[in-house]
Image: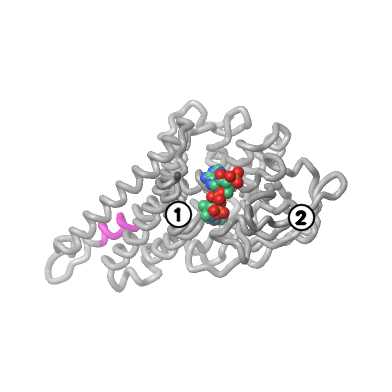
Amino acid sequence: MNPFVGQTERDLARTVAEWSATLAERIPAAEKEGALPRDVIAELGRLGVLGMRVPEADGGLGTSAVAFVLVLEELAAAWPSLAVAVAVNSGIVAGSIVRYGTAEQRKRWLPRLMDGTGLGAFALTEVTSGSDAASLRTTARPDGGGWRIGGRKQFITNARYAPFAIVFARVGELDPKDSSAGITAFVVPLDASGVSIGSPERKHGLLASDTSALILDDVRVGHDAVLGGPGKGFGIAMTGLDGGRINIAAQSVGIARRALEVARAYAKQRTQFGRPIADFEGLRFRIAKAESDLAAARLLALRAAWLRDRGRPFTREAAMAKLYASEMAQRATHAAVQILGGNGYMRDYAVERYARDGRATTIYEGTSEIQRIVIARSLLAA
Ligand code: CAA
């Protein structure tokens, strides 16, 4: 019996906020090691966070998209590396299995995303296929009672922790006039023969979040590995990314919030020219603007999640939320570093880490440029 069933979603967000604040002392060692501690992942499972977006009938909490935004903001404020790992596992991966999985797939795979022993992965990107996701080259060919998958996926979050990945592969030849045709989603157990994980990438930020290549060398899976049917993969990826973009917006809000909190506290106690630097108008105006932008970004993320919870279209609103919130996070973390001055540039103060971590938010789950394309297409469609 999960302790949070029957409690309000706000209680869960508050509990996550209190728990994640206790992790602060562990962050430097974990970031240095480049890995999330296993017991932290296990605790996320115990708290129910890993199953927030899984219906109660499937063993999850079945909480709303709005609640997930609140929880991700708290996780990101505490530790951005942790927030992105949870967003991928519990958002895009769990959501895709819930939405497209057969009863058998849901029963087999959803518990693996919730039990705290690992975190799921979403394997779309390749060396030559980033923003142009439909150009992917990983192939799947029918083989007797199943499929053989070959290819190399790049920048895969959680790859080293994952019991399985949702792998997008092309069935049949590439049609240059319709490159998304034939793309199929497969649930691939990462202990299957022919699967290997590349060395962890050496990143600018999010150092405790795993980002590795996933190599598929003639990996055999059964027909039961196909998610949603052959040829349905591109729609599954795009639908997953629509939701994922709300979650990256929430992550951006958490990162910006914490950086600005640190900057405000610093500005009140740091004295120069005989008074706290918080008295200087240049700084006051900067903080006033950054906090206003932060509030707007949070509302955009909540609006997209609210639409999603009501079953209404939210593709454009998710892209707007991600675009605005991620770019807001750049300005906010930049301002925080500036307010701390020389100290802001030093690793002893968290703001430089928040600035590095936040940098990824305008890139993954679709760059700002891709969000603008999605927004403009939806506004200007014939
Ligand atoms: N929902 C459902 N279906 C959608 C959709 C959506 N939001 N957007 C497009 N589709 C469908 C279209 O309807 C179309 O279907 P039909 O062929 O049946 O008509 C099909 O997909 C192709 O659509 P487009 O012609 O619009 O496709 P495109 O090739 O022009 O690409 C794109 C559109 C928006 C640029 C897309 O490629 C894209 O989002 N690129 C960015 C990729 C991305 O975000 N990558 C992130 C990697 S994952 C990650 O970062 C996770 C992590 O670990 C942190």
The answer to which of 209 and 43 lies nearer the viewer is: 209
Q: Is residue 221 left or right of residue 11?
A: right
Circle 1 residues within 10 Å: few <14, some 14–19, many ≥20: some
Q: Is residue 267 above or below residue 235?
A: below
Residue 323 position, x and y percent, is: 40, 53
Residue 34 position, x and y percent, is: 56, 64
Secondary structure, mark 1, is helix
Point out the image quarter for the C terminus: top left
Looking at marks 1 and 2 on the same chain, the residue that comes earlier in the sequence is marked by 2
Residue at 79 percent across and 42 percent down: it is 223
- Magenta residues? 259-266
Residue at 64 percent across and 49 percent down: it is 118
| Marks 1 and 2, how far apart at CA | 31 Å
The answer to which of 216 and 344 lies nearer the viewer is: 216
Residue type pointed to by label 2: Ile
Q: Which residue is mark 1?
A: 373
Q: Is residue 128 above or below residue 322?
A: below
CB at disc 1 and ligand 1 closer than 8 Å? yes
Residue type pointed to by label 1: Ile
Q: Which residue is mark 2?
A: 149
